[in-house]
Image: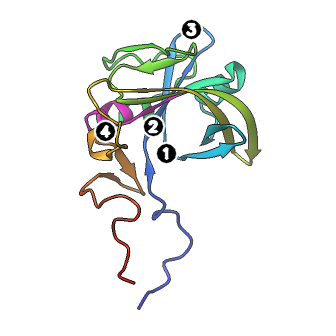
Amino acid sequence: MRKSIGNQQSMIVQPCFLIGTYNPDGTPNFAPITWVSITWCSDHYQLIISMNGTKQTKINAEANRKLSANLVSTNMLQLMEYFGSRSGTGTAKDAMPYTHGRGLSLDVPTLDISKYVYECEVTQIIPTGDTSTYFCKIIDVQCEASIDITSGIDLRDFDPIIYSGHYHAIGNHLGKIGDHHPPN
C-alpha cells in the first residue's frame, strides 16, 4: 500500500554536472546543475539543461551560446559543493585548486578531473518563470582515455554522483536491455 507524500521531485534521479562557461573577462565559471537530460533532434543529439535563478552561468550561456557539461564523479563532490556555494558574478571561483582546459572542438572551459565531458552549442532557450531551459547541440564528447566504452557505458567506471534530493553513488550493474525477459 502507498501513501500520498505530496508534490515533490525527489524520485527523479539526475546525474550531477558542472556546467562550464566563460565569464565576460575570460575566466572560467562552473556551476553545479542536475536538471540535465538528452533528446534526439532530427540528425543529432541535444543536451537539455534547465537552470533557475540569476546565475552567471545562465548569463554566459546566453551571451556565448556554448557551454561544457562536465560529469561529476564522487571524487569531485567537494569541488562541486565549492562551485555551488560561490557566486560567479564579478568574482573568480579560484579559492579551491582545480585544473581546467579548453574543449577539443569548442572554446568552452572543461574540468581536467571530469571523466566525461560534453561540448555543446546552445540552439534554443525557453524561459519559464525563473528557470531557463537550454537545448544544446552536442558537438563533441570527451571520455577518460583509460575507460573502454566499446561495448557500452558502465556507469561504475565513471562513478557519477546521482542527485535525488540527496547525493548517491552507483551500485550494482544489473545487465542490459533484454537480459531479464520473463519466460514465454
Query: How much space separates mark 3 and mark 1, taking CA atoms?
Result: 25 Å
Residues in magenta? Answer: 68-80
Query: How much space separates mark 2 and mark 1, taking CA atoms?
Result: 6 Å
Q: Which residue is mark 1?
A: 34
Q: Which residue is mark 3?
A: 26
Q: Are marks 2 and 1 in contact (CB under 8 Å)?
A: yes
Crowd around label 3: few <14 · some 14–19 · many ≥20 (10 Å):
few
- Splitting the image into 4 quarters, where does residue 81 fall? top left
Image-based side of 59 in relation to 27, left or right: right
Q: Is residue 58 above or below residue 5?
A: above
Q: Which residue is mark 2?
A: 17
For the residues carrying marks 1 and 4, which lies nearer the camera in this image?
4
Sooner in the amino-acid sequence: mark 4 or mark 3: 3
The mark found on residue 158 in the picture is: 4
Can you say which quadrant of the picture contains the N terminus? bottom left
Can you say which quadrant of the picture contains the C terminus? bottom left
What number of labels is visible?
Answer: 4
Crowd around label 1: few <14 · some 14–19 · many ≥20 (10 Å):
many
Could you tell me which secondary element the residue under label 3 belongs to?
A: loop
Amino acid identity at mark 1: Thr
